[in-house]
Image: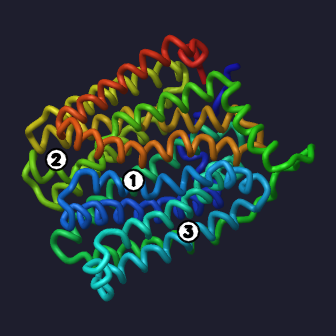
Amino acid sequence: MDFKLDNSDAYAALRIKDFRWFVSARFLLTFAIQMQSVIVGWQIYQLTHDALSLGLIGLAEAIPFLSISLFTGHVADRVKRKKIIVISNFAYFVCAIVLLMVSTKLHGILDMYGVVPIYTIIFITGIARGFLSPAQGAYAAQLVPRELFGNASTWNSLAWQIAAVTGPAIGGLVYGFSSIGNAYAMVVTFAFAGFICATFVSNKPLPEHTTSESIWQSLSQGLKFVFSNQIVVSAITLDMFAVFFGGAVSVLPIFADQILHTGAEGLGILRAAPAVGAIIMSIVQAYHPFFKNAGRNLLICVLGFGLSIISFAISKSFYISAFVLMLSGMFDNVSVIMRSTIIQLYTPDEMRGRVSAVNGIFIGSSNELGSFESGLAAKLLTLVPSVIFGGSMTLIVVGAVRGLAPKLRKLKL
């Protein structure tokens, strides 16, 4: 089935007030989370100087996220989604305050227990994210008409990517030139601002449910829908394995220190580089979407992502490394927009929470599990070979999906 999307007005979704508040809240919270991730990464690296310890940051968030995602997808189809989003935003804000206190006023806790308190706080944010992710994915589709799903996905991605650029860069700069306390204080400020914006989004009613079903029946229906739709499952799978094997974010502190010989400031730039590319591509797609040959373009861009990661692994130049990371962000952005648009178009309203949860398990957790995989692979294979291995696995996944999912390959939107 092909869908016709309205691309005549590049700013169509942004003309809707509720969508503007929604995107603003997502931008501010993402900015805070991205700042926090680079601060936590550098803080733990300074405390441990261990690649596996960096990978464990992702695992600490992925474990609770994976454990509750299917349940929270069911909740997002039964409880008002705005309520879930607001409470989850507030939980992130509280965790940011605790990280600030532990790293400054209560730093004796780190002297006594090492990095365990930091992992514990990250674990709690994983719970909050488990509730937030499916609710956000489902609620976004309620804020704009169907014909604007593609346009809304583009602006959603652009807001996220701008935050992903500025968050790590500012986090690294503030940490490097000021102090960890000031850096975490900024995280607290932006997390609170995101919470406030989320409260201004209007309440939308839940879609009606025509059947009465138990929670287990509800969860199984969400899984059955995803795995019975070749286009949806192949798009999710392609993105998941690309991120899982191709991500090098968790080991960037080691690249910055040992190979590129830069500090927290350079790390912030490296962390921001993929998002710079994604911003460029989001702007391009807002005016010239790649939906006509969506399946083919998706496969080409994930292939380009894998090649970019391999190029980063063998680079010895800071500028070349930043450039190829930027390219990886450009390729990845196409994948993100295509996948989110496909899921929104093919998912019934009453199942959006559960399908968003399955998508979150595949994609969201692959970031954290990919971080753990990167840290473990760097420990076992050494740094550069581990990243080359990850990029090569991404290329293999592209070939496999191309052969096994002809409907995705031929997809046009």
Q: Are marks 2 and 3 in contact (CB under 8 Å)?
A: no
Question: Looking at the picture, which amino acid does disc 1 mark?
Answer: Gly
User: Toward the viewer: 108 or 255?
Assistant: 108
Residue 41 x, y percent position in the rendering: 28, 60
Q: Secondary structure at mark 1?
A: helix
Give the side of residue 317 with respect to residue 83, left or right.
left
Q: Secondary structure at mark 3?
A: helix
Q: Earlier in the sequence, mark 2 or mark 3?
A: 3
Measured in 3D between alpha carbons, the distance from the residue under mark 2 to the one under mark 3, in whole angstroms, is: 32 Å
Residue 409 in the image: above or below residue 389: above
Of the 4 image quadrants, the one containing the N terminus is top right
Question: Looking at the picture, which amino acid does disc 2 mark?
Answer: Phe
Measured in 3D between alpha carbons, the distance from the residue under mark 1 to the one under mark 3, in whole angstroms, is: 19 Å
Q: Earlier in the sequence, mark 1 or mark 2?
A: 1
Measured in 3D between alpha carbons, the distance from the residue under mark 1 to the one under mark 2, in whole angstroms, is: 18 Å
Circle 1 is placed at which residue position?
58
